[in-house]
Image (cartoon, rainbow, N blue to C red):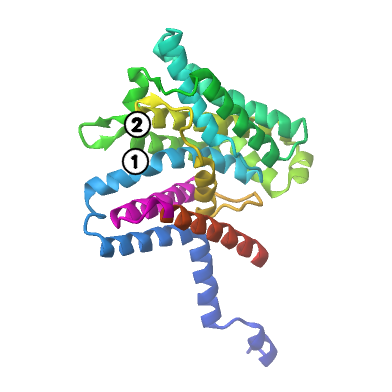
């Protein structure tokens, strides 16, 4: 029989259940929050749970989710990419300018738009990996540079898009929005990269302990180039989706979206300290933001108040991450 001392050292059933509940909520907190938000919005608005409105939520989440998928890669490595919104705008402007003004083949223009995202990501990564600049500073500089290029190239005016880009704003079969489909496909691609490739494993290793990753044989600088190039590529795709929805390339498009993308990643359970996070959590985080905005619109809440609510949500998400790391 166990002694009194050993029995005292053993946790009680209630404590074990509490620990198990905390683990479940820690892994699925964003999903639980999404369900609760859906229940609240359903109670407050009869329109919320209709198929058309749910599709609208998906479309509203699409651009932020795609940006956040790329942001997830960066945050897992304990970095941050503040340039994704500007890069998204630049990709739409590049496609519009090269196709409508220069007369290039639309498919070639589309490739150049995607390439602009990869190049900006590589430039940011070069400053970080080889220039030893903090990611915050390097990507903040790229935020300004990319937005400036978008304004210079466009002359500050919207640029028309070829029908290949306009397709991103359409629906298939009269009911399936293309942005929603693109978001789901890119989510699967991002999940595959993160969980089934060497680059994905290296991201977790670098975020967990960069020096240990280097000593274990990982080329940290090269992996940083890959990580930020992927973030730029996802941002470029998000820009094309947004340009398709707007039917034009807007030099001021996606302004502030970098904060939403970071919020989606953190709400989804990733740590700003690096080493943890996942694509499904990020996807849920983007849906949480979209549900909040959609619900507030249905309730006729002023856009000014919506900004305040989203800011509070971002602050709470970061605070939760900080408290979680302290407990760990």
Task: Please tell me whether mark 2 sits on a helix, a strand or a loop.
Answer: helix
Looking at the rendered image, the quarter that the N terminus falls into is bottom right
- Taking the magenta stretch, the answer to whether it contains residue 136 is no
Tell me which residue sits at (54%, 32%) in the image.
86
Pinpoint residue 136: horizontal percent, then vertical percent: 67, 41
User: Left or right: 15 with respect to 31?
Assistant: right
Location of residue 32 (image quadrant): bottom left
Vertical side of 242 occupied by 274: above or below: below
Residues 209 and 13: in front is 209
Query: Mark 2 Cα within 10 Å, few/some/many (few <14, many 20+)?
Result: some
* Residue 244 visible in the displayed image: yes
Query: Mark 1 Cα within 10 Å, few/some/many (few <14, many 20+)?
Result: many
Pinpoint residue 45: horizontal percent, then vertical percent: 25, 60
Pinpoint residue 275: horizontal percent, then vertical percent: 64, 49
Query: Which mark is on residue 318?
Result: none
Magenta part of the chain: 279-304
Which residue is disc 2 drawn over?
A: 245
Q: CA distance from mark 2 to mark 1?
A: 10 Å
- Taking the magenta stretch, the answer to whether it contains residue 291 is yes
Labels 2 and 1: the sequence-earlier one = 1
- Please report contact status of discs 2 and 1: CB closer than 8 Å, yes or no: yes
Tell me which residue sits at (63%, 51%) in the image.
272
Pinpoint residue 142: horizontal percent, then vertical percent: 63, 31
Query: Which mark is on residue 59?
Result: 1
């Amino acid at each position: 029989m166990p002694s009194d001392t050993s029995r005292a050292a053993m946790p009680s059933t209630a404590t074990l259940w509490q620990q198990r509940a905390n683990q479940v909520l820690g892994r699925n907190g964003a999903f639980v929050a999404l369900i609760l938000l859906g229940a609240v919005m359903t109670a407050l608005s009869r329109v919320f749970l209709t198929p058309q409105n749910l599709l609208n939520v998906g479309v509203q989440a699409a651009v932020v989710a795609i940006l956040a998928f790329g942001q997830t890669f960066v945050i897992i490595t304990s970095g941050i990419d503040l340039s994704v919104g500007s890069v998204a705008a630049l990709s739409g402007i590049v496609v519009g300018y090269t196709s409508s003004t220069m007369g290039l083949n639309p498919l070639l223009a589309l490739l150049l738009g995607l390439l602009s995202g990869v190049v900006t990501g590589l430039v940011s990564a070069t400053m970080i990996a080889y220039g030893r600049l903090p990611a915050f500073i390097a990507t903040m500089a790229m935020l300004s540079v990319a937005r400036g290029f978008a304004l210079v190239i466009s002359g500050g005016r919207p640029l028309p898009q070829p029908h290949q880009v306009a397709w991103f704003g359409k629906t298939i079969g009269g009911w399936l929005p293309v942005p929603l489909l693109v978001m789901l496909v890119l989510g699967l691609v991002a999940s595959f990269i993160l969980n089934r490739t060497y680059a994905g494993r290296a991201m977790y290793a670098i975020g967990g302990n960069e020096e240990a990753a280097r000593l274990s044989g990982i080329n940290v600088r090269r992996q940083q180039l890959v990580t930020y190039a992927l973030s730029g590529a996802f941002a470029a795709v998000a820009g094309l989706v947004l340009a398709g929805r707007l039917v034009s390339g807007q030099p001021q498009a996606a302004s502030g979206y970098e904060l939403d993308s970071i919020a989606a990643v953190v709400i989804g359970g990733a740590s700003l300290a690096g080493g943890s996070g996942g694509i499904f959590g990020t996807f849920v985080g983007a849906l949480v933001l979209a549900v909040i905005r959609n619900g507030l619109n249905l309730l006729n809440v002023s856009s000014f108040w919506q900004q305040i609510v989203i800011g509070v949500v971002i602050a709470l998400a970061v605070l939760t991450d900080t408290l979680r790391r302290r407990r760990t």
